[in-house]
Image (cartoon, rainbow, N blue to C red):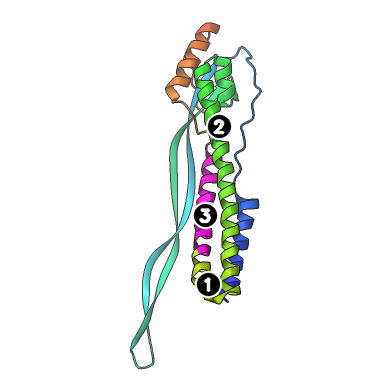
Amino acid sequence: MRSGIMCVAVLGGMLGGCFILPSAQAPKTGAVATGEPLAVVDDVKTWTTTTKEKTGESVVKDENGNTIGTVDHYQDKTTVHSMKVWYPFQGNEQLSDEDFFKIANDQKALDETEKARQNAIKWNRRGKYVMAGGAVGFIGGLVLTYAAPSAALVGELIEVGGGLALSGGWAMAYWGSRQMQPEVHAVDRSMAERDAIQYNQSLGKTAGLQVGRSF
């Protein structure tokens, strides 16, 4: 029974690494200056999470009225989260940070953005390598535990280490992929707004243009 559960855990981890694990996908780039004004658009991103919340417990008694245990009761709790975000725009088109700073001719901000993207890719890749190593270790520990009962303790320790590597590697890879999202920026909003103002002034457009927009 125990070996079956462990095999399912290993399979789940490997499937997660291959199919569920987010990849660090670079944003779409290639936009060029169109003569339209640049803008920093503010928005609020919302999302929900669901967790199990303990609502109480029941006492289990035998036929003689003796307490033999308790049963915990849980229910799903949905929590709504929100955070302020901003996006760079040219006219009505949302831009990647890279294209925005290229058009605005801010080489320093562009360098910082590209450096952050490369770092995200590295962490995503490292996380996947750690997961692969964790899967190998987990399987090796599992085999050792059942192939050599005298070394069962060592095998179980290797299994635990492999499991920790799987979860740690997933966290690393997820962090890397998260840094590629359009609401994550390498520079502060004020720098982007300053660039938009300067660029628009050079075009004779309204400086500091901001547009309310829903995503």
The residue identified by callout 2 is 117
Residue 63 shown left or right of residue 211 in the figure:
left
The vertical placement of 170 against 160, above or below, is above
Q: Is residue 185 left or right of residue 24?
A: left
Name the residue beneath numbered marker 3.
165
Residue 120, horizontal then vertical, whole percent: 54, 36
Q: Which residues are magenta?
A: 158-182
- Give the overall secondary structure of the magenta segment: helix
Where's residue 178, x and y in %? 53, 40
Q: Quadrant of the N terminus?
A: bottom right
- Percent across and percent down for residue 203 are 55, 7
Q: Are marks 3 and 1 in contact (CB under 8 Å)?
A: no
Q: CA distance from mark 3 to mark 1?
A: 21 Å
Residue count near mark 3 (Cα–Cα under 10 Å), binned few <14, some 14–19, many ≥20: many
* Residue 4 picture quarter: bottom right
How far apart marks 1 and 2 lie (CA) works out to 45 Å
Tell me the residue that label 1 is attached to.
151
Relative side of 168 to 129, left or right: left
- CA separation, marks 2 and 3? 24 Å
- Give the position of the C terminus as an image quadrant: top right
Residue closer to the observer: 11 or 178: 11
> Is disc 3 placed on a helix, strand or loop?
helix
